Amino acid sequence: GRVAEAGPAAVRVFCPAPAAGYTHRILLPEAHRVHCRRACIPGLAVPVLAPLEDIAAQVRTNLLGAMLAARAFMPLMAAGSRVLFVSSGFGLMGPAGYAAYSASKAGMITFAEAVRREVHARKIGVYVAVPADIDTPGHTNEMASAPEWMRRAAARGPLLSAEAAAARILRGCRGGRFVVYSDLSVRALALATRVLPRRLRDWSIDRLFPRP
């Protein structure tokens, strides 16, 4: 209601991702924040044989939630506004144990790409962040609840602080890049996906990330 009363000028930067609370807190000044009720979702590690309600919750929160939020706020956004979607490095690949999470985050990337084209004529900037692991309570809970084999991923490097991740994401948005990577490891994964033969890419990922 507060946003609707203020009109288009109130929505200058919008981040439609309930799981990205760190970007709301760090990127936006208090006057431009939109406080949303955080969704209660299961841990990120939701494999294909997880309970159906856990899989559905991942998709509702990570993908459908972003779609519906963008649809609700887009009419309020004026020229010069920016929309930031927060996906994940796992949206670029399908690691074992993260079937629902990686699928929903991959869907967010292509959704953001479509939205970017749809609002281009209105001069609204659309970006999608593809971060690696970030030091958040969600990551702590994920590691605590994940089976031992999922913690052996050789490619998961040191955690980024929420502040460092947000600063890099914001810097990328200001630079006008549609896809914003948080570090070199995710950028290398994106590059490998584009240039390596599929068989070689999959062979590399199979050795960098564990399987049951």
Image: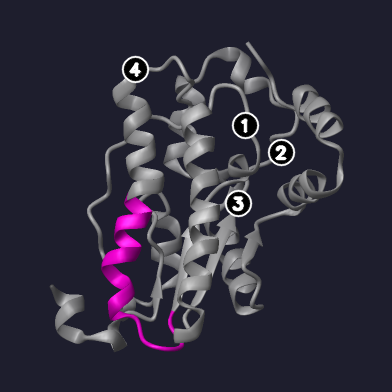
Q: Which amino acid does label 3 sit on?
A: Pro
Could you tell me residue 171's position as x and y percent? Answer: 63, 73
**Relative to 22, residue 138 above or below:** above
Structural distance between the alpha carbons of marks 4 and 2: 29 Å
Q: Which amino acid does label 4 sit on?
A: Pro
Closest to the observer, 189 or 193: 193
Where is the C terminus found, in terms of image quarters?
Answer: top right
Q: Give the range drawn in magenta.
A: 65-81
The amino acid type of the residue labelled 2 equals: Gly
The residue singled out by tag 3 in the image is 131
Q: Which residue is drawn at 77% across and 53% down?
A: 184
Asked if residue 9 is positioned above or below residue 152 in the image, the reply reads below
- The image position of residue 198, as x and y in percent, is 81, 34
Residue 157: mark in rendering: 2
What SS does tag 4 mark? loop
The mark that comes first in sequence, 1 or 2, is 1
Q: In which quarter of the image is residue 16?
A: bottom left
In this orientation, does residue 33 appear?
A: no
Q: Distance between the residues labelled 3 and 1?
A: 15 Å
Q: Find numbered disc 1 in the image and state the secondary structure of the residue it sits on.
A: loop
Q: Distance between the residues labelled 1 and 4?
A: 19 Å
- Residues at circles 3 and 1 in contact by the CB criterion of under 8 Å: no
On residue 119, the disc is: none
